[in-house]
Amino acid sequence: MDYNDFKSKQIDVFLSSEVTEYVLKEFIGYYEKLGLEKDIKLFYPKGLGTKNELNLLFFYDDKTISVTFPEIKNFKITNLSSIQKTELEVVAGSKYNRSLTISLSTDEEIVLNPAKDTDPSNADDFKEKIEEIYKFLN
């Protein structure tokens, strides 16, 4: 799923999470008002289709932007230069079991795992997205 798919499926997003339609529409409008949708290279909606918080990760050539719902407190911007290590874990014999850990210089980690980040109907797309993100960052 890319950002445009996400936008077109807003109704499904808010029905399958704790995010209200109003908050989602307001975020998309503001994000686009700032012009941030123009140069997105990759997009990962962590928590989509789960009852967990929704964390939208936008990857650009020089940074990532992370926005967490239901309460949008800020856009967390991380420069790609602060990434210390990326680790792709592939479980043998499992079609969907992949995880990507992105370690930052601030000792924070971003962990992406399709088995936990979405419902089973989206797991295959998320697995592929994790592999794309890994290639992009390396």
Image (cartoon, rainbow, N blue to C red):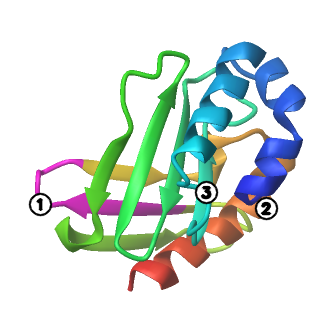
Residue segment shown in magenta: 99-108
Q: Nearer the viewer, residue 95 or 127?
A: 127
Residue identified by numbered label 1: 105
The amino acid type of the residue labelled 1 equals Ser
Number of dots carrying numbers: 3
Image quadrant in which the C terminus is located: bottom left
Q: Under tag 3, what secondary structure?
A: loop
Residue 20 seen by the camera: no
Residue 108 appears anywhere in the view: yes
Mark number displayed over residue 33: none
* Closer to the eye: label 1 or 2: 1
Q: CA distance from mark 3 to mark 1?
A: 26 Å
Quarter of the figure with residue 54: top right
Residue at 83% across / 53% down in the picture? 5
- First in sequence: mark 2 vs mark 3: 3
Q: Which mark is residue 124?
A: 2
Q: Mark number for residue 37? A: 3
Percent of width and height locating residue 90: 53, 72
Query: Where does residue 85 sit, x and y in percent of width and height?
Result: 24, 72
